[in-house]
Amino acid sequence: MWQSSPPGSIYDYIRVASFSIGPDGLVEQWSRRAAGLFGMESGEVVGRDPVEAFMPSELRPRAHRRIGEILDGKEWTGLVPFRLPGENGVRGLAEIYVMPSETGTGERAALCIVVDVRALRRIETDLAASQAIFGQSPFGFVLFGTDFTVVSANERFATVFGGGVDDHRGRTVDDYLGRSEADRLLATLKRVLATGDAVTDLQLVGTVPGSADRRHWSVNLYRVHSGSGRPVGIAGLATDVTQRHIAAREAASARRNLALLNEASARIGNSLDLEATARELLDVAVPGFCDLASVDLYETLLTGDEASPGSWGSRHQESGSGSAELRRVAHASAVPDVLPGILTGKVPGLPPGSVPGPGYTADPAPGTGPGYAAKAPGPPPPGAYGTPGAYRPQGAEGTGPPPLGAVHRYPFRSPCAGALRTARVMDVPVDGTGFVHSTLAVPMVAHDSVVGLVQFSRTKGSEPFGERDRALATELAARAAVCIDNARLYRRERERALILQRSLLPPGDPEAAGLDIACRYLPGNTATEVGGDWFDVIELPGHRTALVVGDVMGRGLRAAVAMGELRTAVRTLALLDLEPAEVLSALDEVARGLGAPGGGDRSGGRWPARTARTSHEADLSEVYLATCVYAVYDPVTRRCTFANAGHLPPVVVEPGEPALLLDVPPGMPLGVGGEPFEEVEVELKEGTLLALYTDGLVESRHHPLDEGLEALRDSLAGPARPLEDVCDHVLSTLDTRHGEDDIALLTARIQGLPAEAVGDWLLPRELRSVARARELARDRLLAWDLGGLVDTTELLVSELVTNALRYGEGEIRLRLLRDRTLVCEVWDAGLVQPRRRRARDTDEGGRGLQLVGLLSAAWGSRRTPRGKTVWFELALPDGAASPELSVDQLLSMY
């Protein structure tokens, strides 16, 4: 069957032409291609001598001889220069194949085949260049035919996929790629062939012969055409980008890790709570880093044990009994219903009563209680969740992950115990048959101490943990561990501060004779609940009460320590029963001594010349500057004596009257020294409200002090209501800006002792006054229905009145007070204070005060403006018989 050469064939490229020479040596036939090659039409050449027609003149002699040889029957091939008409002497070069021929009459002629050497050289150059690019390229080249089989491949392509270049001809995409990738590539080839649109950076994944490693290729595809534009196939350029993918994946992993660490820095440690910090860690890790996670903390850390958790736990592990006790404080899962199912034995897709991993059932082991997945008989399953066989709840024979809040131990040889013991990350081995296929046990290390363990797990479908993941897990656990350790230290310090603060403040409901009292204390630092403000209610002899409110300059723990020292000093001075101004003067000396280096005096010129004050000492002296108001209330007279050391004035609200600021001379703050303190005595009506407070209640940077004082007066005024309600109303009404400064508020409502609860008599200075005193005391006790105290009271009153007659001066005053206890006071004008001493065996007296000390609940003496007062106190009978003195007590007086 005849078939014409398609347009754009090789003959078109090499410009093959032909003509014939007759027996006479003249051109007999001239092809159209010859006309195109030589630029001369057939009419110009046919019948002419070819040498004369297009040969240069200098070459004609040789050409005529060659023509003669050809017509003699000799074949010839050679390069022949020729002249191109109209091209200004430009010459061409043709390669001529001359084949002798015969005419029909037997005469000799010639057939000449002519090739344009210039076109041939261009084709040779193009082929060489194409071969160089195609064959020597470091990239894989492949040419698919229109039937999508390989037409040609270069050496690089053959090197990657094995065999020689010729071995790949006729292969299809299925011979190189897996089914899904091959289908994708074939679809792309069809689209490129159909549309002519090139495809760049087509990503393909596969393997090469002899290796199971996944390779990544970037393929560029474009349609190839013939010279006439007819599609002849699809060319593909494949580049191995596996390393680029690995680098991109590592870069993405690094970015993810950095983002995760950044998120961890922002989200972990926002609260100073141990359990909350553990939950914050899991909120970051799940699902961004793993699918399942849990946190165990040492039980000693949670209970506040002072020992280092890691060291304490290590000693237990070294004994072979397993890890120290840990508590499961947090767990999280990114797989819905999986974590609860693991704990209850009900996991989606598994038989009821089972957990991921063979060998587990939902039957609780002895001692585990509900919610445990107990281990079935036999060795622990390697593919179970968490550490295989590692969970052993205390007192349980079975194993299974402990529920939230459970206290448990890890067996000594388990990976989790090893991680706790060595402070290194441990891989939990799995066999690939369980739900979890990769688990890391990561110790939580802070300041070289292990505080707990976090387990990160990935389920099937996620990549197993690699070295980068181990490093990230360690970093996440370390950050959480530092926050947990900080929370532990904060909690310990806070508990200590609270113990200190609460030990320095009076009880929540202080009691006093003739007073109804309510108080509030709000530290400026709500996180530690410690501050420098204080208040106190001190019982004094004679049912009197000292009310104290003070404010140490400064805040926090140092101010609280200074406050505690001053409060202790106030209590000590108050028990000496000094006048308020004397108490503040002595307290000023105490404060100055506390603020000086080594506790010495700070008065002018007393600093040692050789010692320079350090900044720490200067700061310490500032801490012990304080303000204080001290008041003593006598419920018998309803008179209150005030002394002030630089503090804000008390507020007095009489029934039906507006609130007033009591005019008490302010004085200088404690610790300044150099100025005496003044006293003001005020008689208060029944039902009067008295309020002592610190500046945190009325002073703020947002409003001046005068406005705060006016607001306080307004909040205290109004109809009478319970003191607790008054305190709440004041704190809720005033703009205290709590958090700027400490606040102390002490309120008292005056009640006074009723007249029938007081017995007061003046006795002449004569011996019969002793009997008279006994008689008056007996009658009053019987009137008060306190017959059980008559004998003791008569005896002790007799001793005190006798001493007043023997050692005192002036008139004698006897006073009995009945409130929560019975108080007896004997007054005289003498200044000599009684002193308890031990009498010799031969002494007939000197045992009176010893007897008073043995029979009374308390006794003492105090100075008065006109002498002294000796007193004793007896507890009111509660129905039980009064204890009698033992023999040893009686003998102690001798």
Image (spheres, rainbow, N blue to C red):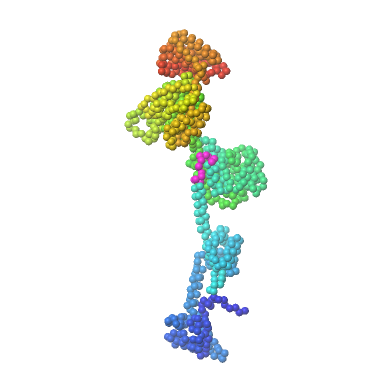
The reply to whether the magenta stretch includes residue 685 is no
Q: Is residue 439 above or below residue 713?
A: below
- Residue 352 seen in the current view: yes
Residue 589 in percent (x, y) is at: 39, 26
Region of the chain picked out in magenta, as a range: 264-276
Q: Is residue 229 above or below residue 469?
A: below
Residue 87 left/right relative to 208: left
Residue at the bottom extreme, as displayed:
105
Q: Residue at x 65, y 40 (%)?
A: 364
Residue 802, image x, y percentages: 46, 11
Which residue occupies the extreme right position in the image?
352
Taking 829 as reference, is 341 left or right? right
Residue 631 picture location, percent across and down: 44, 24
Q: In this orientation, which residue lies closer to the viewer: 792 or 780?
A: 780
User: In the picture provided, is 183 more to the left or to the right than 123?
Assistant: right
Residue 268 belongs to magenta span: yes
Q: Is residue 390 shown above or below 877?
A: below
